[in-house]
């Protein structure tokens, strides 16, 4: 899996907002706010990566988070990206 477009992160009222850019961006109906963990995921998704490789990298980086919790949170964020045609 890999992000379908480039993006910028803009701080709006203290929140990080994901803004897709480029000619192939599909219109989005809502803004996607991201936390620092999601920013790390977005960095990994700039290149092709499998879910298991992504999860393993995140487990190494966030070793204080339970694996099941991390897996659920990553899956939820990836679903948001898919719902907005970003992945």
Image (cartoon, helix red, strand yellow):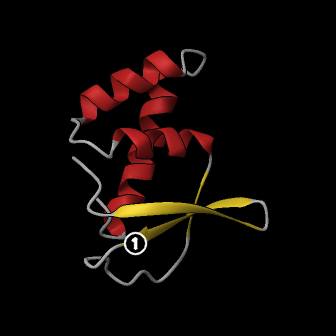
- Tally the marks: 1
In screen coordinates, is 43 left or right of 45? Answer: right
The structure residue drawn at horizontal position 33% and vertical position 44%, both measured from the top left corner, is: 45
User: On the picture, is 48 further left or further right than 57?
Assistant: left
- The answer to whether residue 71 is above or below residue 60 is below
Residue located 78% across and 60% down the image: 14
63 or 75, nearer to the observer: 63
The residue sitting at 55% across, 73% down in the picture is 31
User: Can you give x and y, in whole percent of width and height, for residue 28 in the image?
Assistant: 42, 80
Q: Which image quarter: residue 59?
A: top left
Q: Quadrant of the C terminus?
A: bottom left
Give how far across and how far down residue 54 sits, in percent.
33, 31
Q: Residues within 10 Å of mark 1 (few under 14, many from 20)?
A: few
Determine which quarter of the picture holds residue 21: bottom left
Q: Position of residue 41 (x, y in %)?
A: 44, 41
Taking the view exactly as shown, the residue that stands out farthest to the right is: 13
Question: Badge 1 is on which residue?
Answer: 21
Please determine whether, in this image, residue 62 is positioned above or below residue 17: above
Q: Nearer the viewer, residue 64 or 47?
A: 47
Residue visible at 27% across and 26% down in the picture: 53
Residue 4 lies in quadrant: bottom left
Q: Is residue 52 left or right of residue 20?
A: left
Give the percent coordinates (x, y) of residue 82.
31, 62
User: Element at badge 1?
Assistant: strand
């Amino acid at each position: 899996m890999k992000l379908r477009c480039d993006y910028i992160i803009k701080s709006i009222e203290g929140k990080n907002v994901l803004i897709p850019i480029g000619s192939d961006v599909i219109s989005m109906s809502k803004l996607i706010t991201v936390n620092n963990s999601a920013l790390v995921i977005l960095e990994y998704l700039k290149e092709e990566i499998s879910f298991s490789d992504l999860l393993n990298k995140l487990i190494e980086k966030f070793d204080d988070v339970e694996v099941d919790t991390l897996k659920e949170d990553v899956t939820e964020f990836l679903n948001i990206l898919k719902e907005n045609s970003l992945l």
